[in-house]
Image: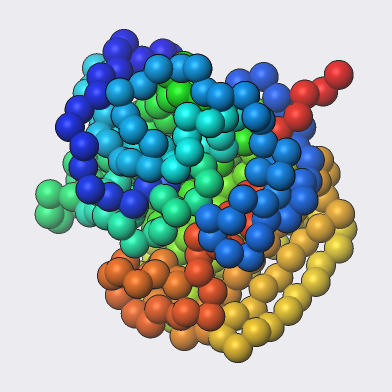
Amino acid sequence: MSPRHLRLLAPVIAVTAVAAVSMAPSAVTALTPASSKAGAEAGPEATASRTPCEKPTEQESDSSQKHELTSGDLERSYVLRLPEGYEKRDDWPLIVAYHGRGSTGVEIEGFSELSDLPAVVAYPHGEIGTGSGYRKAWQGAPYEAPGVDDVAFTADLLAAIEADHCVDSSRVYATGKSNGAGLAVLLACQLPDTFAAVAPVAPALYPGTRTGCAEADPTPILEIHGVADATIPYAGDPDRDLPAIPTWAQEWADHNGCTETSASTRRDIETTRWTGCDQDAEVQHVAVEGGGHVWPGGDIYSGGGHVTHTIESATVIWDFFSRHRLTNEG
């Protein structure tokens, strides 16, 4: 489904998250790892195009602005971040970052630091869901907005951004926090050959986020979670049908056909990595000992509980994304 129209609105102050479009590619391959510093131009940036961007836009580089599009019968909106030097190349990676329940695209841009990365970042806004309060939510959770198709909205969003901006459709990525992280996982299952990798942070993995995942192609996945998360428990919650996070990560590794496992510990961070996977679709799980329902490394409030500064989520996510892109078969 393609967007009816896209129009540029007034600027908003925010930090961004990136999304990228991919239609034809179907295989995943590893790239050179990115620098450990967020925003450093490494990994895929080492082979970035020297061709200037020739798609005109009213939005200036190194800025964030609100945009709207029509998806289905709804007017939807998102914040789009263009990186510094945007006009100098025509193949920017695209990251789409989804906020948690009751939050906004502006808020996740603010605490995630994804807008510091050398990428175009999109921060969509959810629709008002059910349950207590007047809170925005995403598809896949029991409190999702009735009748709202966020998978179709994402497809429309990517099509609109790709049509009007200089992005590389082989380097489109999805991330998010909590309810938005759950949607990122659902998108990996529902939109094949679109995302080169996904990185959910403290994902709310309700049954609705697992629809179609058993039949989905292997997708590289990085999951970051606080062991002391009181909102989406690390050990799972049978009453809400939420899986234990280590079990869920292992199941994804099995699904991706991974054959090797390694683990490392640094202070309060334990990282497990599954490699030797089909289509190089590695799985990585980062457990934060004592960590809460937060965006690790963030300097701005992102949820309840302890925030570690041993890692910065944006850096870990970028390093992971930088190793993966979609490639054509034949």
Residue that appears at 79% across and 40% down = 29
Q: Residue at x 71, y 33 (%)?
A: 326
Which residue sits furthest bottom? 267
Q: Which of the image's four quarters has the N terminus?
A: top left
Q: Which residue lies at the image location 30% right of the left edge and 23% below the top edge? A: 58
Q: Quadrant of the C terminus?
A: top right
Q: Residue furthest left?
A: 133
Can the viewer see residue 103 in this picture? yes
Image colouring: rainbow
Q: Position of residue 227 (x, y in %)?
A: 50, 79
Total marks shown come to 0
Q: Report the front residue among 78 and 55.
A: 55
Q: Residue 213, how many percent across, how many down? A: 61, 41
**Residue at figure coordinates x 21%, y 37% from the top left:** 11
Q: Is 52 placed left or right of 231 in the picture?
A: right
Q: x, y (%) of residue 81?
A: 38, 40
Quarter of the image for residue 44 reads top right
Judged left or right of residue 42, residue 80 is left
Residue 299, given in percent of the width and then of the height, sits at: 35, 72
Question: Can you say whether 30 is above or below 288 in the image?
Answer: above
Q: Determine the image quadrant of residue 306.
A: bottom left
Q: Nearer the viewer, residue 168 or 240?
A: 168
44, above or below 260, in the image: above
| Residue 216 visible here | no
Q: Is residue 10 left or right of residue 149?
A: left
**Front one among 79 and 291:** 79
